[in-house]
Amino acid sequence: MYHHSMSLPAQKPKPSFSEQPSLQLKESAAEYRGPKPSIPYLVHKDPSEFACLKLALHNLLPEDASELFKFQILVDHLQLEEAKLIADSFLNSPYPYTATMAALTEKFGKPHQLALSKIARVMDAPDVRPGDPEAFERFALQVQALVGLLKSLGPDGDAELRVLQMVAS
């Protein structure tokens, strides 16, 4: 839905998993043959959407790419006006990509912002009606994902989880 395919410059060849002595994988299992990954757009003020964009950029942009190249790819994937304005403010920075990502992370990507967004989604979810196992399963998965996220945040996540438990009581 928010994904955009693009070609990236060739990266330095990395040794395959089978060439690394510590990993004993079959050649066929070590090569990914699925669809090409893509970089999503940042369209909404949604911490989950920003987290996906940040992860894709980290995983797909070549490590040795210039700041300006990475900045251009980032800007091409910003559709949220507020995010575009943030990027514009770093256009003449010596490190435009790094500075923009730091500012966007501060604005949209702090872990507690993601947690609060997911908490709101769970709290605002429609009531599960008796006899609707699909709705119950969906709700259970949302709660499971939220608890996993909060646990990954450590003590800060534990505090959010305790607050959520008090609100739900």
Image (spheres, grey):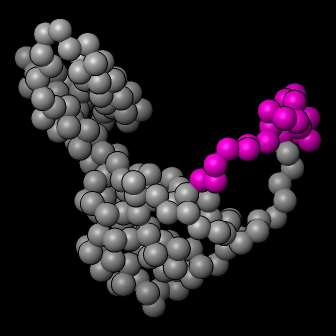
Q: Is residue 116 left or right of residue 129?
A: right
Q: Residue 159 at what x, y percent from top left?
A: 24, 30
Q: Quadrant of residue 38?
A: bottom right
Q: Residue 118 at what x, y percent from top left?
A: 26, 38
| Residue 89 in sight from this viewpoint | yes
Q: Residue 148 at what x, y percent from top left?
A: 38, 27
The quarter in which the C terminus is drawn is top left
Residue at position x 65%, y 69% in the image: 7
The quarter in which the N terminus is drawn is bottom left
Instruction: From this view, report whether residue 5 is shown above or below residue 9.
Output: above
Q: Is residue 85 left or right of residue 154?
A: left
| Residue 97 in sight from this viewpoint | no
Instruction: From this view, report whether residue 87 is shown above or below residue 19.
Output: below
The magenta segment: 17-37
Residue at position x 15%, y 19% in the image: 128
Instruction: From this view, report whether residue 34 is shown above or below residue 101.
Output: above
Residue at position x 52%, y 79% in the image: 72
Residue at the bottom extreme of this rendering: 92
